[in-house]
Image (cartoon, coloured by chain):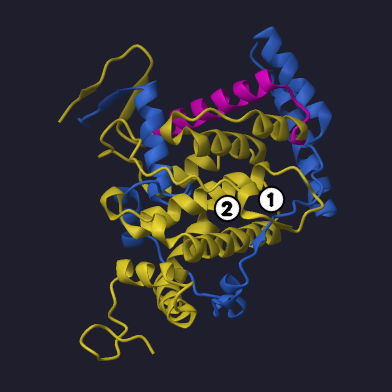
C-alpha cells in the first residue's frame, strides 16, 4: 500500500509524485506498480478518449479505428510507465505530455512498413517527446466543433485522410516524411504531386465551408486585421 | 451587420490546426488544447479488456496491422486528373459520373473490409 511521508495510506499523491515512484521501479517494483495503477485510473479515460477521437477520421474501417486507438493507448501507457522520468513539469501538463506521446505513437503506427512484426522494440517506435509549444501564433481563435465537423464531412474519406495526415505533421512545421508520403502514394495509387494537390484542394473546400458558415474571411493577400 | 474577421491562408491553417487539436480530431499538443478537450469533450468509458493496467508491466509495444487497402476506383481518379490538367470546370454529367464511380468504389471497399 502506498504511504505518504505522513505515514498514512492515501491515493492523494500528486501525479508528479506518482511518476517519481514509477521511476524507482528497479528499487521497489511493487510500489512503482501501485503508483502506476493510481495514475492509470486517473488518466485512462482521457487517454482512450483522445485516441478514439484522433483515429475517428482516419480512412480505416470502424473496427480498425478501435483497434488502432487501443494500440496507441496501450503503447502510450507502457511508455509512460517506462519513461516516467522524462516528464518535465516546466514544459506542460502531464496530460499534454501524454497526448504528445500518443501523437508520436500514432504517427509511427501509420508509417511502419513491416506487416509481419506483431510486437516491436520500443526503439522502432519514435517517442521523441517534443516538449516546446511550437504554435507560433497565439491561438485564441478556433472554429466551433459543429462547423468543423460539418466542414470535414464535405471531404471524401481520401481527402480527409490526406489532409489530416499533413496536419498531423504540421505541428512544429515538420515536413511529411518520405515513407509517409510513399504510404499515401501507394494507398491511393497516386503521385506525390497529386497528394499535394489533394491536400490543397481539401483545405480550400474547408476554407470555403468555414467562410460560408462563420464570420471568417480568408485570403492569401490580405494581411491580418481583426475587426472587433 | 455581422463583424468579419479577415485572416490570411496561413493563419487559417494555424487556426484549423488549433481547432482540430483542441477538439481531439488530432492529438492536442499544448496545455490550452488539452484543457479545451477536457472541458468540452465527453470522455468514453473503459472497456473491460482495458480496465486492468497489467499489460503495461509486460513491457511490450504493439504494432497496428492495417488490412489490405483497396484503392478507390481508378476511373474516378483519372477523371479528376484530366479535369485538373485541363483546368476546366467539370460538367454536371461528369460530376454525376464521378459521384457514381465513387459510390461504387466505396461499396467495393466496404465489401472487402
**Does label 1 or label 2 sit earlier along the sequence?**
2
Image quadrant in which you'd find residue A23 = bottom left
The one nearer the camera, A143 or A180, is A180
Instruction: Name which quarter of the figure residue A126 lies in.
Output: top right
In the displayed image of the protein, which residue is found farthest to the top? B86
Q: In this view, does B86 lie above or below B21?
A: above
Q: Do the residues labelled 1 and 2 touch (CB within 8 Å)?
A: yes
Name the element at disc 2. helix
Vertical position of residue B97 compared to residue A35: above or below? above
Please give the residue where the numbered disc 1 appears in the rendered image: A60
Query: Whole-percent x and y of residue A105?
Result: 56, 50
CA separation in Å, label 1 and label 2: 9 Å
Please rate how many residues cluster around mark 1, counting C-alpha atoms within 10 Å: few if below 14, some from 14 to 19, many from 20: some
Magenta stretch?
A187-211
Left or right: A226 with respect to A164? left
Which of the 4 image quarters holds residue B85? top right
A162 or B111: nearer the eye?
Answer: A162
The hue in which chain A appears in the rendered picture of the protein:
yellow
- Return the residue at label 2: A55
* B8 horizontally vs B86: left or right: left
**In the image, residue B12 lies at what x, y percent?**
37, 28
Amino acid at each position: 500500500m502506498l504511504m505518504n511521508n505522513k505515514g498514512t495510506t492515501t491515493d492523494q499523491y500528486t501525479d508528479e509524485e506518482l511518476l517519481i515512484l514509477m521511476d524507482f521501479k528497479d528499487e521497489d517494483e511493487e510500489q512503482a506498480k501501485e503508483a502506476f495503477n493510481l495514475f492509470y485510473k486517473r488518466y485512462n479515460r482521457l487517454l482512450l478518449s483522445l485516441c478514439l477521437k484522433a483515429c475517428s477520421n482516419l480512412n480505416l474501417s470502424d473496427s480498425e479505428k478501435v483497434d488502432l486507438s487501443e494500440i496507441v493507448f496501450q503503447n502510450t501507457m507502457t511508455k509512460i510507465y517506462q519513461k516516467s522520468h522524462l516528464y518535465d513539469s516546466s514544459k506542460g501538463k502531464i496530460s499534454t505530455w501524454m497526448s504528445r506521446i500518443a501523437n508520436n505513437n500514432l504517427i509511427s503506427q501509420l508509417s511502419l512498413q513491416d506487416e509481419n512484426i506483431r510486437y516491436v522494440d520500443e526503439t522502432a517506435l519514435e517517442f521523441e517527446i517534443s516538449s516546446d509549444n511550437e504554435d507560433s501564433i497565439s491561438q485564441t481563435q478556433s472554429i466551433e466543433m459543429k462547423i468543423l465537423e460539418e466542414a470535414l464531412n464535405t471531404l471524401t474519406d481520401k481527402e480527409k485522410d490526406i489532409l489530416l495526415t499533413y496536419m498531423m505533421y504540421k505541428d512544429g512545421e515538420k515536413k511529411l516524411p518520405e515513407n509517409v508520403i510513399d504510404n499515401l502514394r501507394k494507398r491511393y495509387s497516386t503521385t506525390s504531386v497529386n497528394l499535394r494537390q489533394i491536400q490543397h484542394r481539401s483545405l480550400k473546400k474547408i476554407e470555403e465551408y468555414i467562410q460560408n458558415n462563420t464570420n471568417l474571411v480568408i485570403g492569401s493577400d490580405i494581411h491580418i486585421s481583426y475587426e472587433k | 451587420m455581422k463583424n468579419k474577421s479577415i485572416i490570411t491562408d496561413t493563419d487559417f491553417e494555424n487556426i484549423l490546426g488549433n481547432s482540430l487539436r483542441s477538439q481531439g480530431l488530432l492529438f492536442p499538443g499544448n496545455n490550452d488544447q488539452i484543457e479545451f478537450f477536457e472541458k468540452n469533450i465527453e470522455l468514453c468509458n473503459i472497456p473491460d479488456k482495458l480496465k486492468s493496467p497489467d499489460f503495461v508491466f509486460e513491457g511490450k509495444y504493439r504494432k497496428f496491422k492495417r488490412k489490405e487497402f483497396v484503392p478507390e476506383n481508378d476511373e474516378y481518379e483519372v477523371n479528376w486528373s484530366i479535369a485538373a490538367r485541363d483546368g476546366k470546370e467539370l460538367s454536371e454529367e461528369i460530376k454525376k459520373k464521378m459521384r457514381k464511380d465513387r459510390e461504387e468504389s466505396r461499396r467495393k471497399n466496404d465489401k472487402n473490409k
